[in-house]
Image (tube, rainbow, N blue to C red):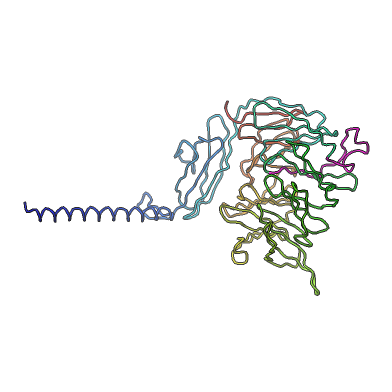
Amino acid sequence: MDLEAKRKRQSLRIIISEAIMVLAVIITVVVLAFIVSGYWINSDFEVERQGMLQISSTPSGASVDIDGDIPWLQRTNTSKVLTSGEHTITLTKEGYDSWSKTVNIKEGLLYRLHYPRLFLNDRSSEKVFSATGSVLGIISSNHNSLLITNNTTKWNYLKLNSEKIDSKTLDIAKYFSNVSLTEDASAGLFNGEILDADWNYDANRILFKVKQADNIEWVLIDVNNIEKSINLTKEFGANFSKVEIIDNAANNLLAVQNGNLHKIEVPGRSISAILVEKILDFDHYNNDIVFSAQRTSKDKIDYYIGFFRVGENQIKKLEFFDDPVRVLISKFYDEKNIIVLKDNIISVHKKERYQDEYTNYQLSFTPEHNEVGHDGEFIFMYSGNNIATLDMEADLVREWTIENAIFDWIDNDMLYTVSEGELIVYDFDGYNRRVIAKNVSSHFPIGITDNKWLYYFSDDQLVREWLIEH
């Protein structure tokens, strides 16, 4: 064979092979882009656009049933391409109760279901602490710590995230003044009314708002080192109407005095000059502060929404109103949102495009209270036992009612209330109502810790139940 002809054939084969490889890569990229965009070929070989469902559960390993079909997988924590439209998702696991919800899958979009919780049917329980004589229980937002108060100056602090429950006594007498202690503080009696108590994210400090007669005082208690506690009212000689923690360690606070907003630096025991005058409402996400305030001109009084970052003096005025409004700020995925509540209208604005990109929702009632849910996934609004949940993932509002107007969060995504001794839980949007315990005290907090234990009070005893098989 001619050597030159052989070289030409080899070169031709190489060119053809490389062309095939390039073509295969191009086809693969196109197919992947096609799939990522939500397109799929159904069983009839027709092209249709679909969405994706990503689902996990606590505990993991639940079987997933879609629209009544045979489970298409044995475990959760996975993703599935589905046709657009409504689908009913049911989770089951041997030994546990079930969970179900109908979701709307949108073309080309991902729908996350990360909060489903299944409860063990036969749970072992034990009494871990006697709360006889206690007045109030205050559980941290991560449900790992619990402070139990009474009418004395000796309170009990418990760590809940270990099998052995140890209690520590905190002597709070030096940190509350005669506003909340009896005149004879040496008697060791506490007669203040605790109006509010908020843990910081690190669960080592609690900010108290306490009333006695017509006097109010604010006290920041350090549960790990009581000597680092501070009575804010006495320290700054100020009558604060509102104080909020704005960082994980509670080293920085925002406080309203005489209608003006200030920043308090706890380690340095210092208070800033006025940040915002005539403030009506504010909320924060880390150092981002959104607020509503009053503006007075020669002609009239009106109101505006503003935004600034702590440490920066530049205030950006976003919108003006004839009447007062309330505000929230949240972060969902990687985008920050500013939520405006005006009567029964909720407006959700993209922070960076406030005027240009927003959505309005109308409720059938005017909420008195509002808060941002875990990871900014939902906005929770309520008045009495009327609740409205704005689900940011599903982009819809659901209104519902709860049996009892006294309720709280049992974990990051689930509410609870106690009615006639029954402990009732709901998903954040009111679905999956379940009774999970009986003979439960309604005036003490309830929480789930580390996804292992359920804590509640029964007959002045702190009870712990195992949520998983052990």
Residue placed at 50% from the left, 45% from the top? 54
Residue placed at 72% from the left, 59% from the top? 291
Q: Pick the quarter of the image with the C terminus.
A: top right
Picture layout, residue 420 above or below residue 387: above
Residue lying farthest to the bottom in this orientation:
299
Number of marks in the rendered image = 0
Q: Which of the 4 quarters of the picture holds residue 122? A: top right
Horizontally, is 5 left or right of 274 in the view? Answer: left
Residue 32 on the magenta segment: no
Residue lying farthest to the front in this orientation:
268
Horizontally, is 223 left or right of 15 in the view? Answer: right
Q: Nearer the viewer, residue 110 or 164?
A: 164
Q: Which of the 4 quarters of the picture holds residue 464? A: top right
Residue lying farthest to the left in this orientation:
1
Rendering coords of residue 294 (x, y %): 77, 64
Rendering coords of residue 222 (x, y %): 75, 39
Picture layout, residue 324 above or below residue 36: below
Q: Nearer the viewer, residue 298 or 83?
A: 298
Rendering coords of residue 44 (x, y %): 36, 51
Horizontally, is 317 left or right of 194 in the view? Answer: left
Tell me the magenta residue range. Answer: 175-200
Q: Nearer the viewer, residue 122 or 168?
A: 168
Q: Nearer the viewer, residue 42 or 151?
A: 151
Q: Which of the 4 quarters of the picture holds residue 450? A: top right
Rendering coords of residue 431 (x, y %): 62, 44
Horizontally, is 396 left or right of 384 in the view? Answer: left
Picture layout, residue 126 above or below residue 398: above
